[in-house]
């Protein structure tokens, strides 16, 4: 995951934003507690969404407390406190994903360029093992999906659907964990699948320019025969269509989910945050109708 | 049975008009059209039934036992029945799809030789792909089905649904299909937020 699943702050109520931040801070703290201080810096918005949705469907109560921030002692942060294992689970998934991402970049880059990821991999592989021990089912699925992804890239897969399938299945299994009954299992699997598909394809759209210049694998380049930067500009609307379809499916799946709390925040992320990220990714920063604060 | 007021997300003291509005908003959200071809359509139908029942219950109670039905509430949002076309060459595959056995359906579809692949084959292939989440191939397949049988309403409906979603209609207007601006999104969110608050969520 790559940090694309974000909130859209301008349309958030202050209390919603603070709840959202409290989940972010709580997750940061949990990762620090379980996987060491350095791992904290690997936290991104995607895992916050994973934790947020987990807490949203969780039956247990969810409280908030104000304590000093772990990274900045002068600051006070609000932390979301829950007895459930949602935060611990999201931390583990975050470590597993990081581990696979690092392995991927080691395999992808030349010897000298791979030195940094190699070093990080050494640092984090023990932590990933710990996470895999806690959640073996997910660790297995992740391992298989990454292998499949590599195979598809090696054979230069021309199908957008096939290329997105492994990441989609990964998230599908990650969200399935929160299921309470058969109905919620089906909803969460579908939601995870379409979200994973969106994340993979948004990332592919983001990398289009780089991938063309460097000749790297990119499903859009092969499927639509994109050769130059001009081609990228002309296929912007088409990219939007592909990604909109995924968001739309995430949205209808989420509508069916029984949610205890945080519904407006999740809706903000799905209906505004993701479309806004998607717009930036496809049309560049200028096209974005918001100013950075 | 659930409290009908809770189902609609309104207070017991809400006026008839408020209840109607809440009912319409929810009915739009869970409208069968938004879930056509979707593997979760049965769950959406269930929600829809729940909302219809809750609305009928409240209205009956308020009219002192007089029979009222959601049909009188201004608009009826009934269950959607796609309905199979009269003659189907692939009824076995249709049965597999409707019982959720998507992989088996795909295997059978793949086994059909290319010269026997007609409009219906492309439609069913599209349905299976859509359910798996392979939206690009599904789109191509539905398009081909419509090209081969331009006047078939079933294939046309499937293609329309997917087109609506591809142009943001699926989430930006919650199925309205009309154009939408920042104000609409904002008011939509406000409504959604109010509903959630009544369910006991929020911060």
Image (spheres, coloured by chain):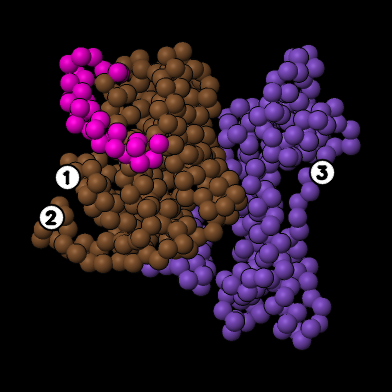
Chain colours: A brown, B purple
Question: Element type at marker 3?
Answer: loop
In this view, the mark in front (2 or 1): 1
Find the distance from the CA under tag 3 to the CA under tag 1: 58 Å
Residue occupying the point 31% across, 29% down = A101
Q: Residues within 10 Å of mark 2 (few under 14, many from 20)?
A: few
Q: Which residue is mark 3?
A: B83
Q: Nearer the viewer, residue B5 or B162?
A: B5
Q: Residues within 10 Å of mark 1 (few under 14, many from 20)?
A: some
* Residue A262 falls left or right of residue A210: right
Q: Earlier in the sequence, mark 2 or mark 1?
A: 1
Q: Chain of mark 1?
A: A
Q: Position of residue A30 (x, y in %)?
A: 26, 51
Residue occupying the point 30% across, 66% down = A64
Q: Chain of mark 2?
A: A
Question: Element type at marker 2?
Answer: loop
* Residue A89 falls left or right of residue B186: left
Q: Which residue is mark 1?
A: A37
Q: Which residue is mark 2?
A: A72
* Residue B192 falls left or right of residue A138: right
Q: Quadrant of residue A67?
A: bottom left
Extreme residue in the bottom direction: B64
Residue A270 appears in the figure: yes
Q: For the image shown, how many numbered marks are present on the structure?
A: 3
Residue occupying the point 35% across, 14% down = A215
Q: Which residues are magenta?
A: A107-136
Q: Residues within 10 Å of mark 3 (few under 14, many from 20)?
A: few
State whether discs 3 and 1 lie on one chain: no
- Whether tag 2 and tag 1 are in contact, CB under 8 A, the answer is no
Q: Position of residue A210 (x, y in %)?
A: 32, 23
In the figure, B152 relative to A106: above or below?
A: below
Secondary structure predominantly adopted by residues drawn in magenta: helix
């Amino acid at each position: 995951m790559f940090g694309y699943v974000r909130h859209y702050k301008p349309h958030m109520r202050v209390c919603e934003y603070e709840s959202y931040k409290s989940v972010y801070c709580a997750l940061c703290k949990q990762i620090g507690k379980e996987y060491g201080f350095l791992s904290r810096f690997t936290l991104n918005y995607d895992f916050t969404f994973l934790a947020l949705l987990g807490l949203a469907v969780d039956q247990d109560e969810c409280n908030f407390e104000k304590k000093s921030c772990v990274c900045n002692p002068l600051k006070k942060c609000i932390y979301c406190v829950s007895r459930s294992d949602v935060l611990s689970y999201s931390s583990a998934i975050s470590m597993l994903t990081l581990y696979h991402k690092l392995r991927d970049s080691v395999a992808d880059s030349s010897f000298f360029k791979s030195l940094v990821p190699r070093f990080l991999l050494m640092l984090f592989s023990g932590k990933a093992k710990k996470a895999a021990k806690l959640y073996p089912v997910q660790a297995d699925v992740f391992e298989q999906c990454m292998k499949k992804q590599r195979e598809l890239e090696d054979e230069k897969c021309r199908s957008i659907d096939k290329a997105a399938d492994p990441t989609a299945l990964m998230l599908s299994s990650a969200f399935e964990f929160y299921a309470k009954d058969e109905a919620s299992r089906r909803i969460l699997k579908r939601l995870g699948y379409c979200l994973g598909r969106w994340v993979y394809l948004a990332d592919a759209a983001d990398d289009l320019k780089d991938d063309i210049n460097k000749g790297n694998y990119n499903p859009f380049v092969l499927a639509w025969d994109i050769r130059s930067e001009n081609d990228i500009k002309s296929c912007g609307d088409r990219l939007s269509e592909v990604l909109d379809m995924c968001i739309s499916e995430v949205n209808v799946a989420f509508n069916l989910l029984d949610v205890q709390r945080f519904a407006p925040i999740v809706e903000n992320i799905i209906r505004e945050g993701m479309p806004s990220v998607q717009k930036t990714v496809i049309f560049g920063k200028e096209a974005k109708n918001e100013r950075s604060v | 049975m659930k409290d009908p007021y809770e189902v609609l997300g309104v207070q017991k003291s809400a006026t008839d008009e408020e209840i109607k509005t809440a009912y319409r908003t929810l009915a739009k959200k869970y409208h069968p059209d938004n879930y056509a071809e979707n593997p979760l359509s049965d769950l959406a139908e269930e929600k829809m039934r729940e909302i219809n029942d809750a609305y009928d219950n409240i209205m009956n109670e308020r009219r002192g036992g007089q029979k009222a039905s959601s049909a009188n509430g201004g608009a009826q949002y009934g269950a959607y029945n796609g309905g199979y076309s009269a003659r189907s060459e692939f009824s076995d595959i249709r049965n597999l799809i409707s019982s959720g056995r998507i992989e088996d359906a795909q295997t059978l579809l793949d086994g059909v030789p290319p010269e026997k692949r007609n409009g219906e084959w492309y439609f069913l292939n599209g349905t299976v792909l859509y359910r798996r989440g392979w939206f690009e191939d599904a789109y191509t397949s539905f398009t081909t089905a419509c090209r081969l049988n331009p006047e078939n309403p079933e294939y046309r409906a499937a293609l329309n649904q997917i087109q609506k979603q591809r142009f943001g209609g699926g989430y930006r207007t919650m199925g309205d299909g009309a154009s939408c601006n920042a104000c609409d999104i904002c008011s939509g969110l406000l409504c959604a937020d109010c509903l959630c608050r009544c369910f006991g969520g929020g911060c």
